[in-house]
Amino acid sequence: MKEVSEMTFEESLKELEKLVDMLENGGLDLDKSLDVYENAVKLRDHCRKILESSERRVQKIMESSSGIQKEDI
C-alpha cells in the first residue's frame, strides 16, 4: 500500500472500504484487527483533510464568482 499522504481521495476511500470489510467480516486476531483499525483511522483522516480542502476551494470559487472577496478560510 502507498503512503496514505500520497493517495488520492478515491484511492484512500477504496482502501478504507476494504479495511472496513475486513473488520466487519471478522476472523482477524486482535493484533491484526488493531492494525487494520489504525490504518482505517489514518485513511479516514486523510479523506477528511482532502474533503475540507476541496470545500474551502469551492467556497473561494463561489465567493470570487459572486464578487465577494474573503480572506483565506
Image (cartoon, helix red, strand yellow):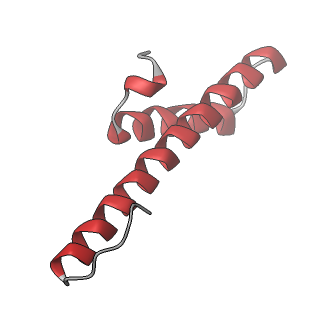
Quadrant of res 63: bottom left
Residue at the image point whose x is 67% and y is 39% from the top: 24
Of the pair 16 and 48, the residue shown nearer to us: 48
The x and y percentages for residue 3 are 45, 18
* Count of all numbered marks drawn on residues in the image: 0
Residue 68 % position (x, y): 27, 82
| Residue at (42% x, 46% y) in the render | 50
| Quarter of the image where the C terminus is located | bottom left
Residue 39 against residue 69 in the figure, above or below: above
Q: Position of residue 20 (x, y in %)?
A: 60, 38
Above/below status of 5 relative to 45: above
Taking depth in this image into account, of 70 and 61 the one nearest to the observer is 70
x and y percent of residue 30 in the render?
Answer: 83, 20
Q: Residue at x 33, y 70 (%)?
A: 59
Quarter containing the N terminus: top left
Outermost residue toward the left in this view: 65
State left or right for residue 37 relative to residue 47. Answer: right
Q: Quadrant of residue 23?
A: top right
Taking depth in this image into account, of 44 and 72 the one nearest to the observer is 72
Q: Is residue 65 left or right of residue 28?
A: left
Q: Is residue 72 above or below residue 2?
A: below
Whether residue 44 sits left or right of residue 15 in the image: it is: right
